[in-house]
Image (tube, grey):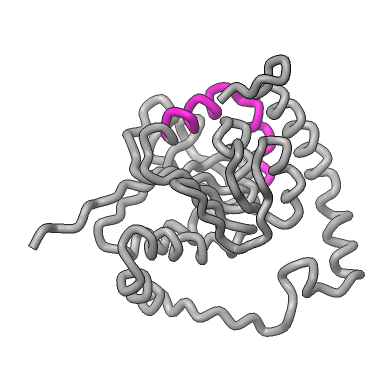
Amino acid sequence: MTAPKTYRVAMMMFDGMMQLDATAPCDVFNNTPGFTVVTVAPKTGPVTAHGGLMFLPDYTFDRAPKADILCIPGGGGVNPLLTDDKAIAYVRRAAAEAAYVTSVCSGALLLGAAGLLKDKRATTHWASMRFLAPFGATPVKQRVVTDGKLITGGGVTAGIDFAFAVIDQIRGREEAASVMLALEYDPAPPFPGGTPDKTPPDILNRAQKASAQLLTVRHAQVTRAAAKLNDGGRYVA
């Protein structure tokens, strides 16, 4: 019997990332036979995620090996990377070599800044859906959206669903179901909520106010990044 193809996943890491965006898919991939995760960051040394957890990435952008799957998590730390030439260059290079180009949460915006969402269907965190269109994407309100080799996951916890969708596509339903069983993935929220349409208006309003400053900065960065992709109205990939 021929051994199944192995897959290397390059998980980006950066200061201010939402750690669950990265670690949840990593657990799914690391529990799937034949999948190996390497972590890639803008710099050497520790990366501090939102909330203070620290990670020691395997590679910097300039030393990262070729990967079959590129995955970009989200979080407030995405904002400065949207106009960071080195980050954009790495994403473009890694995406060109990868069989699958993926993101979780607002990590999709970095794919957009790299010119990889043009004419693609994509999703992201509910609070950042409006930032997809400036990059030429068609926003889709789903937990996971697949468009060719592009697979995007919604906000934070959607990264688990996203990873299982990737395994399902690559290895099939039986393999994906086996990993789901191993991780006992059977979500059952203790009460309704988690999306704007299921959340009481007063809680939603507080959440929107709490994230207003981050989203204001994000809007400015998205505007700058989208402008860099256009030259006299001509899209530059």
Q: In the image, what residue occupies the spot 42% across and 62% down?
A: 27
Res 170 → quadrant: bottom left
Residue drawn at x 74%, y 75% as measured from the top left: 193
Is residue 12 or residue 167 the one in the foreground?
Answer: 167
Q: Is residue 136 left or right of residue 3?
A: right
Residue 78: x and y in percent read 64, 40
Is 6 inside the magenta-drawn segment?
Answer: no
Residue 180 on image: x %, y %: 40, 74
- Percent x, y for residue 184? 43, 79
**What residue lies at 56% left-to-right and 56% top-to-bottom?**
145
44 or 78: which is nearer to us? 78
**Residue 211 location in percent, x, y?**
81, 51
Magenta segment's dominant SS is: helix
Q: Which residues are magenta?
A: 76-94
Is residue 11 in view? no
At horizontal 63% and vertical 53% (from top left) the residue drawn is 123
Q: Is residue 215 above or below residue 153?
A: above
